[in-house]
Amino acid sequence: MNIPLPSHPPLADDLVAIMKCRFGSRFAQGESIRVQHGRDESAHEPAPPDAVFFAGSTDEVAEVVRLCGQYRVPIIPYGAGSSVEGQVLAIHGGISIDLSRMNRILAIHGDDLDATVAAGVTRLQLNAALKGSGLFFPIDPGADASLGGMAATRASGTNAVRYGTMRDNVLAMTVVLADGRIIKTGGRARKSSAGYDLTRLLIGSEGTLGIITELTVRLHPIPEAMSAAVCAFPDIAAAVDTVIQSIQLGVPVARIELLDALTISAVNRHSHTTLRELPTLFFEFHGSPAAVSEQAQIVQGIASSFGGQEFAWATRNEDRSRLWQARHDAYFACLQLKPGCRAFPTDVCVPISRLAECIQATKDDIARVSIPIALFGHVGDGNFHLVVLVDPASASDMHEAEWINERLVERALAMSGTCTGEHGIGIGKTRFMVREHGVEAVAVMRAIKAALDPTNLLNPGKILPPGASS
Amino acid sequence: MNIPLPSHPPLADDLVAIMKCRFGSRFAQGESIRVQHGRDESAHEPAPPDAVFFAGSTDEVAEVVRLCGQYRVPIIPYGAGSSVEGQVLAIHGGISIDLSRMNRILAIHGDDLDATVAAGVTRLQLNAALKGSGLFFPIDPGADASLGGMAATRASGTNAVRYGTMRDNVLAMTVVLADGRIIKTGGRARKSSAGYDLTRLLIGSEGTLGIITELTVRLHPIPEAMSAAVCAFPDIAAAVDTVIQSIQLGVPVARIELLDALTISAVNRHSHTTLRELPTLFFEFHGSPAAVSEQAQIVQGIASSFGGQEFAWATRNEDRSRLWQARHDAYFACLQLKPGCRAFPTDVCVPISRLAECIQATKDDIARVSIPIALFGHVGDGNFHLVVLVDPASASDMHEAEWINERLVERALAMSGTCTGEHGIGIGKTRFMVREHGVEAVAVMRAIKAALDPTNLLNPGKILPPGASS
């Protein structure tokens, strides 16, 4: 939260003149556009860029990156603005490169189960384009994020337990480097052992090593049968134990999501559902009709042995959609728990055997603070979120939020987990990088950053903690 | 094949003295040990190291790496010696660091479905240790390779179509860097968005960026039911079309392997099987009994529609094992097709929609040469191998082998595929790196190499083609 924002010089007149002449209204310096590009879905203090460039092509991105290099101007890639750790904030000023107009679906190779899209295409847009193809793209962070942004933050979502994260579902990318060179990484083969895995290096690099402008993603056949269910539990431990046992037994659940009682009450109000306000699991099973019923039976047995109530089924498509829409809106639902507040979202991920203990200890911490905190998440992966609701003007709220977050991360790291399962580092978690990875591994990351972006113009201040470079 | 071997000075007397004093007989300079460490399973001309160090711990590896740095001596990590593109050859001399004695299984976390092992542990050793746990480790290259070596070459095998490759199944690693620093990458959480993915960068880096000394791998529950079957086809196109349709329908086959008629005849002789000498698919289905029978039924239907014969089932464990042992021995079986020959193995991987065309064109090429060439592979991934049998002393054999390989790779690249699905680059495929990735992406790889190993002592000459550094 508290990285100081160094003052920076305004954009050079020459650069502004070139950009205006070259791109007209696609180079914007108006305050409202700058403000809009200077914040994300988090509680981090907004930091608007000096200007916004609405890119139309990879070549244009490369051209602007070269210009920014000449004028030593920071570059912040911007997709849908739905990051939650301040990834898009222009904390050192500079030009925000907005890729949202690069939103063409370039190719759908149904026979190969892949699609190539420009970086600004969103996950819902891709799935809409896939309608009728029998295929879908499973990765679903809460927001309708851009696929470029999702790759840049190594996003996942509710389907990751079965279908993997962006790490597993990106085959190839087009990337503009810090000096304006354009590279292609990966390819359309399902696997390759041909040299360094630049695709995976760039996924999760949050725009600090290059700007993703196109990507080829894996698609999956829509299962013959899909069935969703909701099950309430007497306490959160019972719900988590159900998850752990299902995963350990290898049941290939497609989704297995935990919402605590507070989240359920927020969802009820926001999405007009009538769920019992108890710790609840949302399940989804994919496969053939027989496989789905078999999986459901096993998991129902486990749930019932831990005191879970009857499964409430949603088998019709519209009921399933409504259920998952409610789940995806949980974050926004929670925002309404404290009117006028901002949300301070955080997430961790731990080995599944430690999940119950980690969640219980976190619940104990939550009981010790005054601010409302909702807990929910992708528990099949060992991943869960807190949405901490704060009045940013209240020092006490901010102090409590920091305390909760610090304790949560320490706990996850002590359990061989990670400080973020899917939100990324941004500016919010740079201070945990050394604790999680050690001084030397962070030095290696710095060395890679220095090799690929020696003047530190690509999204400076993100991921790597301030400190001596290696 | 034809990278010139620069002459290099002998090891400095001081270094030899220190190594002998420090490690006694674990530092070996005898010719037979050097010769053994200077070759792999390929036809590449052997290049023995100046000495071999049998490492006992990560700290020892770090110590020797630092010493080698002081004396500017190349370091070649060595696991089981089962690489097939010359990865372990000491083409610039130096010390081979043999990790095979670092073969302790450090932890099995059954509840979390992971295990931590020293790099010298082999895949069969790990699976033996898992006996009775209900878990297994699926990645199975033909040889009983070391897990460190498998990570270093991004290995896969017959199960990859369902369980992924080493890329997907390594969670964390301990790595010794070029200057002797030790880092830990990744962690035991199932997913993370915390910074650059050093694990994935190092997987497939073939010892050129660091030496993997320990790794944590994912384990998988042994399916309730497993069933294998063999099905012969009138021609190779029918077999490949069966694969393509099964994959496109999303049938979650665990294994789907193609062996051409020549390979089957070699297998029959080597493994005393009585398979019909026709293009043949080996299948395996994993899941609940109902799911297995359902998958088998679908695939049988597809196979029969393409003219496949009756499935011959192997449901008893010992029959399944015998079948897959025969498949794993196919490489060695093929070696016996031409007594006294050496095998020149190569592999490519293409998008599944191009697989039939790629295999047919390759078969047409094979018909045009005089040397025996077996074709088999992991066709569910779009990946297949040629085993080209050559007399290395015959210029004509070598010329034909090169011609076949060159055409194969060009064809795969033209189809958006890769020059190697799982064998890696080593010294055998460096010349294809720029063709596959482009000049600029290879320059990025060089920049990373220069950042992490500025004096180019870690397995020099592997992966990156000779040429100007970026």
Image (spheres, coloured by chain):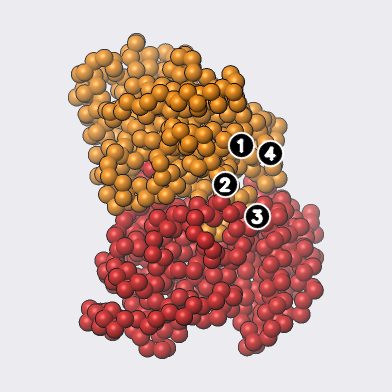
Chain colours: A red, B orange
For discs 1 and 2, the disc positioned in front in the rendered view: 1
For discs 3 and 1, the disc positioned in front in the rendered view: 1
For discs 3 and 2, the disc positioned in front in the rendered view: 2
Q: What residue type is labelled 2?
A: Ile
The tag earlier along the polypeptide, 2 or 4, is 4
Q: In this view, does A186 lie above or below A402?
A: above
Q: Are marks 4 and 1 on the same chain?
A: yes
Asked if residue B281 shows in the view, the reply is no
The 10 Å Cα crowd at callout 4, few under 14, some 14 to 19, many 20 or more, is: some
Label 4 – label 3 distance at C-alpha: 17 Å
The 10 Å Cα crowd at callout 3, few under 14, some 14 to 19, many 20 or more, is: many
Q: Mark 3 lies on which chain?
A: A
Asked which secondary structure carries label 2, the reply is strand
Label 1 – label 2 distance at C-alpha: 11 Å
Number of the label disc, if any, that sits on residue A234: none
Asked if residue B172 shows in the view, the reply is yes
Q: Nearer the viewer, residue A415 or B284?
A: A415
Please give the name of the residue rendered at 61% of the width and 72% of the height, measured from the top-left corner.
A345
